[in-house]
Amino acid sequence: MKTISIHELIQNMKLETVYMPDTIKGINISGSEASRPGLQLTGFFKVFPHDKIQVLGHQEIEYMMSLDYDLRVKRLRKIFEYPIPAMIITGDHKVLPEIIEFAKEFERPLFKTELPATKFISKLLAYLDDLLAPRTTIHGVLVEVFGMGTLIIGKSGVGKSETALELLKRGHRLVADDAVEITRVDEMLKGTSPELIRHFMEIRGIGILDIKRLYGFGAVKKWEAVDLAVELEHWDEQKEYDRVGLDENYIEILGLKIPKVTVPVKPGRNLAMIVEVAARNNRQKQFGYNAAEELDKKLKEELGKKRKELEEQRS
């Protein structure tokens, strides 16, 4: 099970605390889902998802109020006997005294929100999806280039931050420098920066720069989907670099494959311009156009014509 901070849940979901056990600092949940215990209020507990946050909305509360007092107390007690992570009452309903009583008896966190159940659950699931998603941290720089989240990676000192700084001067936006926190949300990789170093960049010989103050709010972004990885490496005369682009290379992050290009670094190369071209080229590929494949197709057609002409001359 995953554990989330009870105080973060209260703060991010803007919850009113009705009862909080003194011993609880975090709550254990099995996934990014919530449960509305309507069936349990009717007495059906066979498949009760008690490991999820329980939400009582208008329908559940109206049904409870239709029950006689003894039956209502019996079913509420049964719900609270299970180790539920928390109970949340939604809308403008008052919290019934028996709910507060059982929350205290079984030490279950109890909260209140003014949002209606459907809207609150939608907000809660989005929050839990982001919080509980698989995540990793990669050493590199994440920049938005022409709307493409471009992850610049490579060994220390190869020029990642300097390349990103030149991209900022060209009007692109910084997401993260040095440490890129990547979260998998469904089939998307979401990149962001650790809160402590957000919008800061280290340039060797100068030191730490505050990009938001130097270039303005338009030069930074809180998060971006990772669409492309550009690996910078020192030029190796013994290595044969791809000059056509027919071979597709990928980097796997959290089980998803992201297109990757390797750019050799040597004096005189405009790396920022190359990264821009790589981002544009990757966008074209997403739209179904591959320049290398198009050229290869034309070459094959031309060779076919030449071969056909030679065969006609021989005959």
Image (cartoon, rainbow, N blue to C red):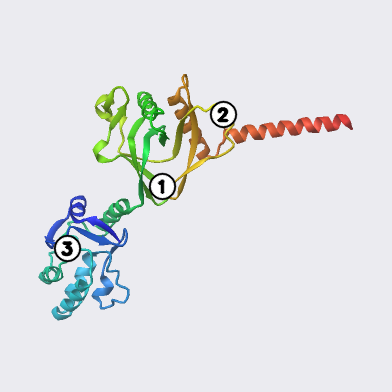
Q: Give me the disc on residue 109.
A: 3
Q: Give me the disc on residue 238.
A: 2
Distance (Cα) linking label 2 and label 3? 64 Å
Is residue 176 toward the left or the right of residue 78 in the image?
A: right
Q: Residue at the spot x=18%, y=80% of the render? A: 71
- Residue 273 percent across, percent down from the top left: 45, 25
Q: Earlier in the sequence, mark 1 or mark 3?
A: 3
Is residue 176 toward the left or the right of residue 252 in the image?
A: left
Q: Residue furthest front?
A: 238
Residue type beneath disc 1: Met
Q: Secondary structure at mark 3?
A: loop
Q: Quadrant of residue 99?
A: bottom left
Q: How many numbered circles does the render carry?
A: 3
Is residue 60 toward the left or the right of residue 243 in the image?
A: left
Residue type beneath disc 2: Gln
- Residue 284 percent across, percent down from the top left: 51, 35
Are dots 1 and 3 in contact, CB under 8 Å? no
- Residue 171 percent across, percent down from the top left: 36, 26
